[in-house]
Image (cartoon, rainbow, N blue to C red):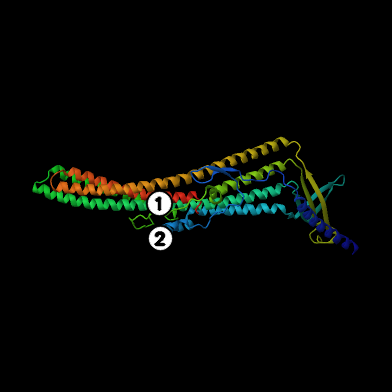
Amino acid sequence: MALALRTIQRIVTAVRFSIAISLSGLLLSACKLIGPDHQAPEVSMPASFSQSGTTWKQTSAPKIYEQSRWWKTFGDAQLTSLAQAADSQNLSLKAAAYRLDEARALSRSSRTAVLPSLDFTPNIGSSESRIPGAGSTIRRDTVSLPLELSYEVDLWGKVRRQIEGANAREASAQASYVATKLSLTADTAQSYWALRGLDADRSLLQESIALRKETFSLIEARFRAGTVNALDVSRAQTEVATAEAELIGVDRQRSELVNALAVLTGRNAGSLNIPAQAKLPKAPNIPAGIPSDLLLRRPDLFAAERNLAAANAEIGIAEAAYYPNFRLRAGGGFDGAAMSNLISTDNIVWSLGSSLTYPILGQKNIRAQRDATIARHQALAQEYKQSVLVALRETEDALTGLDFLRRQEDAQNQAIQAAENTLTISRERFSAGLVSFLEVVETERTLLASKRQAASLRTQRLALTVNLIKALGGSW
């Protein structure tokens, strides 16, 4: 009885010791971490777009607009339907979601490194040994059911840096997912406005074909009456055929864009039907705000900054390798010769201990690994700054481009009015027999080209507005 009590006391002592090493490890891990703490690089930012600059430094966590429904700004029901389908059904976006799940799982896994490990390693075996001179053997059976607890004391912050890096990579994956969503929905909107531009162009060509066929019929009648020559008839027929050929080319491009939209929305090519709609809306006015807001909104910049934070944590991990690795161990269980009487006080075993590992001959390799992580961190810092420059350029290009297109569209509308007046005068002069039909043909071509150019400019403004929204991070 006394032996049993002593054995139970030993087991309780082992458990208490296990708890103690866990608590001591947590206290020791409160020490200052090895390696530099992450700071977002200072970036020279303009005070406003197209004006003088200032220095901007990140002081708060960026706000990523994951749930932004920016496409509703255009007020187009068909665009909203397509964008929402791409947002929920695009296969590339689903793949990005799984990559995000992977990063989150790895982050959760890294957090378990601060906890002790408890392993159950049962073992059953037997052995034989010969007795010298006796000519006989002794067989020995062994059965053990041990529990082993092990804890790595995070004296230098290596484990905490690992967790820090995993959390940063998870945040980067989250931002990359949002960036993928923004890019795919922007591609959907770009394709949609290109499709609408083709519809407007197609409508103009159909209108032109109808007018040219009417003119051709008139020219044929005059030819039969002997008031015009065969050359005018041939020219009128050529204009009809040319416009019909262009219409076929537009239909081919439209079919390709519909197929592209089908793939973007997670469907098979040929399965999507989008009704033609020739009227193009005006592009909405998007306020750009101040340049530094890009660093708070753009998911790609946030992802780059979080990758930089993860690389900074790796420097601390590499530097912690210079220092000793301290591990505490405790174990207990049963060890006997047979399973039948294994669970008894006589077979109880326990152990306590610690180990210290210090690299002696690997210092050169550790130094090289540390230098590599520092170099990688510096490279990512430069890439982050480059990404900021690209973001500013994209926003500036969109803003200035929209201003140029607005002025260009105004001028083009004046050109259309002038071409319409010229065509009216040419037709009157041709009816009076003052000029040949060639003049009418040229003025019709000019008017059609002016109208198509105006539709193209309107389409470009809509597409460039999408570019601006994307450059602003999907919100403003």
Query: Farthest residue toward the top?
Result: 364
Q: Mark 2 points at which residue?
A: 77
Is residue 120 at least partly visible in the picture? no
Amino acid residing under circle 1? Leu
Residue drawn 22% across the image and 43% down it: 442
Crowd tier of the residue under label 2, counting other residues whose Cα lies within 10 Å: few below 14, some 14–19, many 20 or above: few
Is residue 128 or residue 290 the one in the foreground? 290
Count of marks overlaid on the render: 2
Q: Position of residue 169 (x, y in %)?
A: 61, 49
Residue 166, horizontal then vertical, whole percent: 64, 50
| View extreme (right): residue | 2
Residue found at the far left of this picture? 225
Q: Quadrant of the N terminus?
A: bottom right
Give the percent coordinates (x, y) of residue 68: 50, 57
Provide the residue designation for mark 1. Answer: 462
Q: How far apart are marks 1 and 2 (CA)?
A: 15 Å
Question: What residue is drawn where x is 67% and y is 50%?
Answer: 163
Determine crowd level at label 1: few under 14, some 14-19, many 20+ residues with C-alpha closer than 10 A: many
Q: Are marks 1 and 2 in contact (CB under 8 Å)?
A: no
x and y, in percent, of residue 312 in the image: 65, 44
| 252 with respect to 134 (left or right) | left
| Amino acid identity at mark 2 | Ala
Q: In this view, does 16 lie above or below 135?
A: below
* Secondary structure beneath label 1: helix
Q: Horizontal placement of 274 versus 2: left or right?
A: left
Mark 1 vs mark 2, foreground winner is: 1
Q: Residue at x 45, y 47 (%)?
A: 399
- SS of the residue under disc 2: helix
Q: Is residue 39 left or right of residue 352?
A: left
370 vs 384, nearest the viewer: 384
